[in-house]
Amino acid sequence: MSQMLKSSGALAVATLTSRLLGMVREIVYANFMGTTWVAGAFVFAFQIPNLFRRLLGEGALTVSFIPIFKEKEILAGEKEMWHAANAVISGLIVACVALIALALLGITLALAWGTFSDETRLILELLRIMFPYLLLVCLAAVFIGMLNARGRFFIPALGAIMLNLVMIATVILLAPRFGGTLQTQIFALAYGVLLAGIAQMLFQLPALRKEGFTFRWVAPWQNETVRKVIRQMLPGTIGVAAFQINVLVTNLVAIRLDAPIVASFRYAVSLMELPQGVFGLSLATYLLPTLSGLAVDKKMSEFRSTLAQGLGYMVFINALAAVLLFTLAEPIVRLLFEHGEFNQISTHDTSLAVVCLSPGLVAFSMVNILARAFYALGDTATPMRMSIACFAINLLVVFALIGPYRQGGMGVANTVSAVLNVGFLLAALRRKIGELELSGLRQDVLGIVASALIAGAIAFGTNRWFEARLGHGNLVLKLAVVFAPMLLATLSYFAVANWFKISFPKEILGMMTEKFRKLRHSP
């Protein structure tokens, strides 16, 4: 069985746990603040420091630093490897502290002298509290990257569990102490973001110490490793995080139109991030150090085959997730979020965004993987150029569709830009390294599409049957109209794919069977 599937599968288990807790956090948030204008203000304010988590934790800093870190380990030994890591960490602390200080000064002056609407003032006040999260998440990103490069994937992925647990506890335990209105209680969530960042960062340190890491200040000013990371990181900031940047900018447009749009779109994005993170990001995280090592060793044939195999696994799994989200959007949103402040109108708005985002799920994950292939080769400029073009297209579609279709227009824009980004990246990678060895995947695509369409039809029909005869008047029925269609659709998907002689179902089921046997025989 593929080592990639075993490693990324273990990582996916940790990621699944953290993503499920992330979904619980979103459910708690939805119950607490719904899709009100206060929720829109918080979501937008949090997205600004959270963007740095996406860019750095899953993006530019990590993908720029890991290949260099891996190269130092292979070519110069562990002493130079840890010295390079300390130089990057020292430079990161200096840069983040300076950026935080400037941001806090600017926000404070704006609040003191400016005249703003209630939404804008609340955004600035929340942002002033949450902006220091930037330093915490950047340090956590480097720690996670170092552990990944050392072959440690499971423990780093669990760090997000600490983050989500703290944020959930904040709503339940801290928010009631911040007054009796949502406008004051929302500040508890902002302080919770800082506490969560501290927890996630500290969680990585014991595993790093076991690997031999001890932090020592290394002056970053003239350090060659720091300069190299910066050169590769700057264009990569745009290249690997096209989806996250698109979400932020489209939300900037949306909040000027109507703040609740931002909240409902955020809940839709959180549903997309569950399958995208569990398998797409897990594979991308595994592939970066693996592809970097192959690139350093000049094993380009293995580089191509490893990349093709990773893309194949991702397409197979996320095609199923995409069709289930598309056909079951409303019952899923109703089951998860329709409580407390989240009402039927909120369900309708969020479901519309899910339907429009779900066709792009495979593309979103492919962008993550393809961008990392470029970074493993030391090329950060090409993904940047591709993303700039798609970024412009995204904005054009948003401006054209957000007025009449609101959340739906935002979803369509992100889907279109992601699909185009995949096409651009594939073409550019083919020019860079020649034939990509995707012939096997191309042969499987027809079978995967047919399997997904059949699964989608079964999910849709089963859901309609349950709704017509039983409705969704209580929790048991809400569970039934989601999970019964989902189970039947999944079984049919694997069965039809196996009938088409696609290899992925057998390999995935084989991995699950092996894990089950180990659990049964473990003491």
Image (cartoon, grey):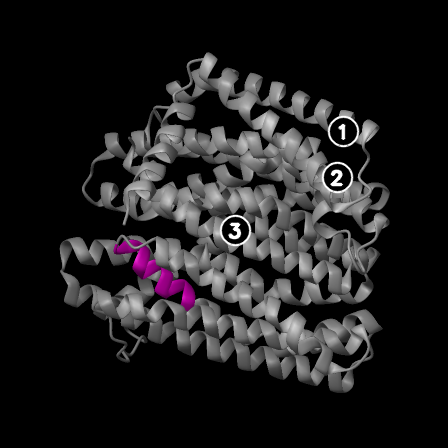
Q: How many marks?
A: 3
Query: Residue at left 73%, top 29%?
Result: 463
Mark closer to the chain start, 2 or 3: 3
Mark 2 and mark 3 residues within 8 Å of each other at the beta carbon: no
Element carrying mark 1: helix
C-alpha separation, residue under disc 2 versus residue under disc 3: 39 Å
Which picture quadrant has residue 204? bottom left
Question: Which is more toward the observer, 360 or 376?
Answer: 360
Marking on residue 329: none
The magenta stretch is 140-150
Query: Residue at left 65%, top 57%?
Result: 26
Look at label 1 and name its amino acid: Phe
Q: In which quarter of the image is the N terminus?
A: top left
The x and y percentages for residue 519 are: 33, 43
Question: Which is more toward the observer, 226 or 209?
Answer: 209
Determine which residue is flagged by label 1. Answer: 466
Look at label 2 and name its amino acid: Leu
Mark 2 and mark 1 residues within 8 Å of each other at the beta carbon: yes
Determine which residue is flagged by label 3. Answer: 241
Determine which residue is flagged by label 2. Answer: 477
